[in-house]
Image: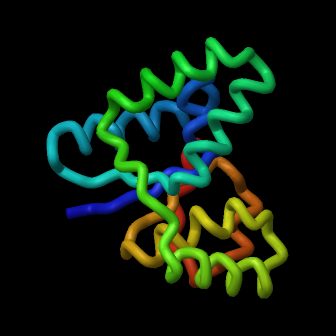
Amino acid sequence: MKRHVLDADSLKAFLEDRPGAATIEELLWNAAQSQQRVFVSVLCWNYLFSLVWRSKGEAVAREKMKQLSQLPIEVVDLTEADASGAAKLFAVSGIDFLECVAASTAQQRRATLVTTNKELSKFGDAVKILFAA
């Protein structure tokens, strides 16, 4: 079974119907059909909540997260292995730590990281990435 991890950028693209949204929608459809699993780190989930809150207000943020929670996305806790992996990725890449958390979450679950952030190509072969466009 295929496994994917969404980062905050991919979820934001989905919510705002920006480039990459169709890719996320397809992944979620497949997850609903039990053909794959879709994860998101609790840190990325809450970061997205804070971004929406800041730009649209608390009520809209709560409604958007409620809508997302109805989708086949598994919000996973940050484990020690996830955090340690993120620290290593951050140390060698200099990429934003939250993105490193998403990447490490994917690594630990033997999943593909889904993002719209082209900067993550700096991870090279360390992380399997699907760039949603």
Quadrant where the N terminus lies?
bottom left
Q: Quadrant of residue 127?
A: bottom right
Q: Taking 130 as reference, is 105 above or below it?
A: below
Q: Position of residue 92 (x, y in %)?
A: 78, 86
At x 62%, y 14%, the residue is 60
Q: Quadrant of residue 73?
A: top left
At x 33%, y 28%, the residue is 70
Quadrant where the C terminus lies?
top right
Residue furthest out toward the left = 34
Q: How is the image coloured?
A: rainbow
Q: Taking 102 as reference, is 85 above or below it?
A: below
- How many numbered discs sit on the rendered protein? 0
Q: Position of residue 110 (x, y in %)?
A: 37, 75
Q: Quadrant of residue 126?
A: bottom right
Residue closer to the observer: 6 or 118: 6
Q: Position of residue 71 (x, y in %)?
A: 33, 32
At x 53%, y 21%, the residue is 64
Q: Taking 114 as reference, is 49 above or below it?
A: above
Residue closer to the observer: 28 or 26: 28
Instruction: Classify residue 40 as left or right of residue 115.
Output: left
Residue furthest out toward the right = 94
Instruction: Classify residue 70 as left or right of residue 124.
Output: left
At x 33%, y 38%, the residue is 28
Residue furthest out toward the top = 59
